């Protein structure tokens, strides 16, 4: 809807009304069309102001409408009608002007923004382009290089940057609507010839060909197979090279291709999935809307290794007071230096003062006595963590939440070391903890709803995408990673090379294939875990027996590399070779080639040709299959939780929508059929055995992903 009022005698004020962000739904578009017509037809009205209700100008087209039969007036003619109006129209931008919202503002003759407003054309992040004239007006207004940057990245700019770029005419710290109305009064009756952006020539550039070639190269490199950024460059090129009306035709044509694409569906699913995970629920029935978080003003971090340092930085940057505890004197000094550097670099990037005074360092665990919440980040060793939890429980004040940054250990066991197990939850950060957006909040059987709500709330406060998950080995992310890694190793045994496996996964859209990723994270991490699990043995050396552990197929390849001291990038050797320890450029290693050949010969393994399709199916479908088991077990509340975890924690390509959404796009029947095929070929690999839930979903006619919860619920009620 849009409300019309007359203010200051001669200004028609149009207020968009569609909470919370005044998205341009059919009703809002109709409201704008009607009220603009009214304002233009009333002789008393000399100028018009468009604003949004409750401090938000407009969040753009209504994304919920995209999957429907769109009705109501289309945006392009609506914006043209505003631009060609003979009375000045002023956009009063508070809060956000995004996507169609900014395009609407660009159709106005003047734009006044509040200093705290954010503006942008984020359509690319939804698999689209700004198809309401954004790709044609913005380059005409601010020039091609700046427009390319905003349109291909979708980044939001502050009002100050928008003013510098020339997107807005004025910014204010006062009531934006009042300022806009005053301004509208001052420009009433003035010529609008120079105010219609569509009539501007696109600013020339010394070498458009080189500029667009470079832009295209850049998006190809960063898009990892996403098509929208490429279409955005093509649309801006049309603005630079064609008259406005032909550019608009090109924009429409490119949008038509994107609009119905699987990538757009995937990216729009991600948008809503990311918001849905905030609406968490626990198996006990506790939920986000019935569980109140407790305030956290002061927190402590125990253990200042890589993870602890990142967590301390993340907390301090969000304004919390932090007690950073490291009992090893040398490590404490090093950590203080490192954290200071991290805070200073981060502050420089963001143009703020480093939050150095937010952190106090201490070698003494007793100093956490007055904090509201503690995050333990000591070495990943159950006995050590149990000891720390026991100590913490004894020293902290009543009601302090005790969180662990374990990446997969049993939360319940740690809780049982404390006097108040209901205050214990997992806060699983991802390295580097001050950068990576994902936080798994892990609740055990005794964790209270308050503890989960507090950890989720804290996660949000420090800028994380927090997902509440149940307690099991590896939680969601690492549990699903296990079969993925396992398949990659089996593929090497059967004849593939690390380069080949990585290439298939990188072409799929991962930033890094599984072997390059393992080299980066360090092969010794998994080795330590496998040793603790009794999987690493030195007795059996050849034959099939050597490749069976605890009754299942097992590949000792990773263990054998570690025995050679090949821990990945940090040692300069792993699945690849590197120029020197710490170097990031991975090169194929002839040593590894020989090693694999010898290994296969020793174990009587017959090499065969493995294509990319098999690599993808075996690695991804086994991971997805585990995702179905996680849903079956109630560890994740819905497929959105898993997908968000994979997008934000494991660099799953967003335009593929996360593993569970990807499975729904491939077709559940197809995933099931391929898993059955591979399981038949590898009966000793349980992760290839199709899960009950997958079978059930297929038996139920493969419902769309938003209906899976109903099938899961039924399955749970049958168990
Ligand atoms: C920054 C935000 C705006 C606010 O953030 P925050 O304060 O943190 O709040 P959130 O939790 O994110 O959001 C609150 C709730 O609001 C919902 N929301 C937000 N934005 C939208 C929206 N645009 N539409 C619908 N709903 C929205 C959100 O889901 C939350 O709901 P809930 O509480 O969880 O229930 C932040 O929200 C944000 O970034 N929003 C998105 C901004 C954005 O991306 N905007 C661009 C949208 S796309 C667009 O504008 C495109 C315009 C081009 C024209 C399109 C023309 C389409 C038709 C063309 C058809 C041609 C093809 C023909 C094919 C054929 O031939 O058949």
Image: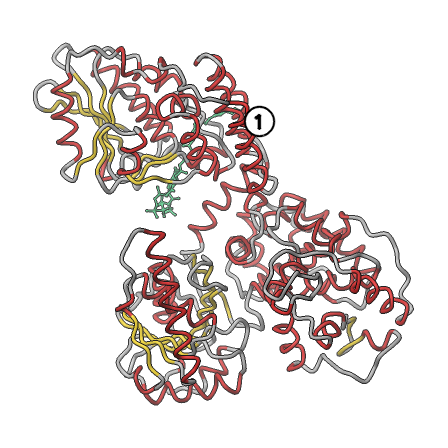
Residue drawn at the location 69% of the way across and 71% of the way down: 566
Give percent across and percent down for residue 325: 37, 80
Q: Position of residue 509 (x, y in %)?
A: 62, 46
Q: Of residues 593 and 97, which is closer to you in this image?
A: 593
Q: Nearer the viewer, residue 632 or 682?
A: 682
Reply above or below: 192 against 603.
above
Q: Which quarter of the image is occupied by the C terminus? A: bottom right
Q: Is residue 652 left or right of residue 458?
A: right
Q: State the residue at coordinates (18%, 25%).
A: 13
Above-or-below relation of 654 to 578: above
Q: Is residue 657 left or right of residue 284?
A: right
Q: Is residue 617 above or below residue 416?
A: above
Q: Quadrant of ligand 1?
A: top left
Of 322 and 46, which appears nearest the observer?
Answer: 322
- State which quadrant residue 77 falls in: top left
Task: Report x, y in % for residue 499.
Answer: 73, 54
- Residue 385 percent location from the top left of the image: 48, 83
């Amino acid at each position: 809807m849009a409300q019309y009022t007359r203010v200051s005698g001669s200004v028609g004020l149009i207020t968009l009304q569609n909470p919370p962000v005044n998205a341009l739904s059919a009703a809002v578009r109709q409201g704008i069309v009607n009220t603009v017509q009214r304002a233009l037809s009333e002789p008393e009205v000399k100028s018009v102001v468009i604003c949004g209700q409750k401090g938000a100008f407009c969040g753009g087209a209504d994304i919920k409408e995209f999957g429907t039969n769109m009705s109501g007036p289309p945006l392009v003619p609506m914006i043209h009608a505003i631009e060609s109006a003979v009375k000045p129209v002023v956009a009063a931008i508070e809060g956000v002007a995004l996507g169609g919202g900014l395009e609407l503002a660009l159709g106005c003759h003047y734009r006044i923004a509040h200093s705290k407003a954010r503006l942008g054309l984020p359509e690319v992040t939804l698999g689209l382009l700004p198809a309401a004239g954004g790709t044609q007006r913005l380059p005409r207004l601010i020039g091609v290089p700046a427009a390319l940057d905003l349109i291909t990245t979708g980044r939001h700019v502050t009002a100050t940057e928008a003013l510098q770029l020339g997107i807005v005419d004025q910014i204010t710290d006062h009531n934006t609507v009042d300022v806009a109305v005053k301004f509208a009064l001052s420009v009433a009756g003035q010529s609008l010839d120079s105010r219609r952006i569509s009539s501007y020539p696109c600013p020339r550039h010394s070498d458009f060909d080189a500029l667009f070639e470079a832009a295209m190269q850049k998006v190809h490199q960063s898009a990892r197979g996403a098509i929208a950024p490429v279409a955005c460059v093509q649309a801006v090129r049309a603005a630079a090279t064609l008259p406005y009306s032909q550019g608009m035709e090109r924009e429409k044509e490119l949008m038509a291709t994107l609009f119905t694409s699987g990538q757009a569906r995937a990216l729009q699913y991600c948008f809503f999935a990311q918001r849905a995970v905030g609406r968490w629920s626990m198996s006990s029935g506790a939920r986000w809307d019935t569980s109140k978080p407790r305030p956290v003003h002061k927190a402590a971090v125990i253990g200042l290794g890589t993870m602890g340092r990142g967590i301390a930085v993340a907390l301090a940057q969000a304004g919390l007071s932090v007690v950073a505890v490291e009992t090893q004197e040398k490590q404490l000094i090093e950590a203080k230096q490192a954290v200071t550097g991290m805070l200073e670099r981060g502050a420089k990037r963001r143009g703020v003062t480093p939050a150095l005074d937010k952190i106090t360092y201490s070698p003494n665990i007793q100093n956490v006595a007055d904090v509201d919440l503690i995050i333990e980040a000591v070495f990943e060793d159950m006995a050590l963590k149990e000891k720390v939890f026991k100590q913490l429980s004894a020293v902290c004040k009543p009601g302090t939440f005790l969180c662990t940054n374990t990446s997969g250990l049993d939360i319940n066991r740690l809780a049982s070391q404390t006097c108040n197990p209901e205050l214990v939850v997992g806060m699983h950060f991802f390295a580097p903890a001050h950068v990576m957006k994902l936080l798994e909040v892990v609740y055990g059987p005794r964790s209270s709803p308050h503890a989960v709500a507090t950890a989720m709330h804290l996660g949000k406060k420090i800028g994380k995408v927090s997902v509440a998950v149940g307690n099991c080995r590896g939680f969601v992310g690492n549990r699903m990673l296990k079969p993925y890694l396992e398949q990659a190793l089996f593929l090497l045994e059967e004849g593939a090379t690390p380069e080949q496996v990585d290439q298939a996964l990188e072409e799929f859209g991962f930033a890094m294939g599984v072997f390059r990723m393992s080299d980066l994270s360090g092969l010794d991490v998994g080795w330590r875990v496998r040793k603790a699990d009794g999987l690493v043995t030195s007795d059996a050396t050849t034959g099939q027996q050597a490749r069976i552990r605890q009754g299942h197929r097992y590949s000792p390849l990773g263990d054998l590399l570690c025995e050679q001291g090949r821990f990945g990038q940090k040692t300069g050797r792993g699945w690849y070779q590197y120029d020197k320890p710490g170097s990031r450029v991975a090169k194929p290693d002839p040593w590894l080639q020989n090693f694999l050949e010898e290994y296969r010969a020793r174990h009587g393994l017959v090499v065969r040709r493995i294509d990319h399709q098999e690599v993808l199916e075996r690695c991804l479908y086994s991971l997805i299959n585990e995702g179905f088991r996680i849903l079956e077990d109630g560890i994740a509340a819905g497929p959105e939780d898993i997908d968000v975890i994979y997008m934000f924690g494991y660099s799953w390509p967003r335009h593929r929508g996360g593993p569970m959404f990807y499975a729904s796009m491939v077709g559940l029947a197809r995933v099931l059929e391929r898993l059955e095929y591979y399981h038949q070929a590898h009966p000793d690999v349980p992760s290839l055995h199709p899960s009950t839930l997958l079978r059930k979903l297929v038996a139920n006619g493969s419902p769309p992903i938003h209906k899976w919860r109903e099938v899961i619920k039924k399955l749970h009620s049958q168990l």
